[in-house]
Amino acid sequence: MPFTTRTAVTDMMDSGHSTPTTTSQRTSSSTKNTSIDDRATAAAAAAEGRDRLPASASEKLPSTTDMDAAGEQMVWNANGVAIPFRKLISGDDEEEEEKKNGDNVDGSGSRSHSQRRKRVMAVFVRHFFCGNCQEYLRTLSQLITPDSLHALSEPTSIIVIGCGSPDLIPMYIETTGCRFPIYADPSRKIFDLLGMTKTLTLGPARPDYMRRSLLTNIVLSFVQVIKSGNGAFKGGDYRQVGGEFLFEDGKLVWCHRMKNTRDHGEVPVLKQLLGFDVAKDAR
């Protein structure tokens, strides 16, 4: 199957002086879920004043038309299998995968209808060689596990979507140690429909989830590009940034779009949003 991605190895080093180029936001004012509002507001307060997530519950959600169109777009897994995005955000595809792998709540290899996940957090990352996003997934995988998500009062799953070729997903999993399913949207149509932007701006401050220096990340990313051979031009658009989108019963209820290349939502903020006991973690 053909995959076309516009990339350049020379764009590897994110510039702190580039001007963001935004896609059309196509957003409409949607009614917000009250419980999500309350949790997100508390989460913002828990972030010690950081402005990496908005103080309000959510940024503007995409219009119903754009959400419907995004749901019909295809993403690809590491095996090159195309899956409709709407299937991922309903949690159905992950449930099928877990049945095959025997990875489930009670160890039986099956899940009753009442146990089926209703919440999905979709994490959109930049190109597959981005050291900033790789750091984010390492931290995310260390602080949130699939078992801890299943144990929530509202069982939740996390999926990761990048903008490069699915050929690079195995490398990405090995590099990040990510414990969540990873998919590819090389056309970036879902990124665009959900209102995510393009920029090479670094942002004002190093986020907490980045445990390596920026220089180290750049060097390691460059090494990955060289080792990948022909994959160097399959990582995805180096200007594309992502974000985090929370779905309940297949409906988008909360979102955060990255404003710069290291603006993922801090993990403690996401944990409180999802209903984890962040105060207990701090003790």
Image (cartoon, helix red, strand yellow):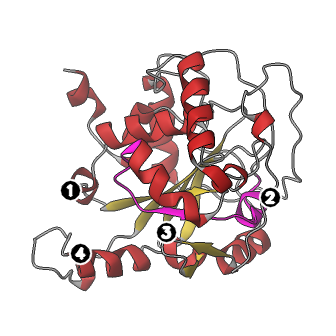
Residue 210: x, y in percent?
48, 24
Residue 14: quarter of image:
top right
Q: Earlier in the sequence, mark 1 or mark 4?
A: 4
Label 1 secondary element: loop
Q: CA distance from mark 2 to mark 1?
A: 34 Å
- Along the line of sight, the residue nearer the viewer: 47 or 184: 184
Q: Is residue 177 above or below residue 131?
A: below
- Please state if 47 lies on the left or on the right of 245 as rendered: left
- Which three-letter amino acid code belongs to the residue tagged 2? Ser
- Please state if 38 lies on the left or on the right of 276 as rendered: right
* Camera sees residue 264: no
Pointer 4 residue: 101
- Along the line of sight, the residue nearer the viewer: 194 or 161: 161
Pointer 1 residue: 151
Crowdedness near tag 4: few (<14), some (14–19) or many (≥20) residues, C-alpha within 10 Å: few
Label count reads 4
Viewer-side label of 3, 2: 3
Q: Which residues are magenta?
A: 176-195
Crowdedness near tag 3: few (<14), some (14–19) or many (≥20) residues, C-alpha within 10 Å: some
Residue 151: quarter of image:
bottom left
Pointer 3 residue: 78
Q: CA distance from mark 3 to mark 2?
A: 34 Å
Q: Earlier in the sequence, mark 3 or mark 4?
A: 3
Question: Which residue lies at the image location 77% right of the left edge and 27% below the top edge?
Answer: 201
Q: Is residue 80 above or below residue 170?
A: below
Q: Is residue 37 magenta?
A: no
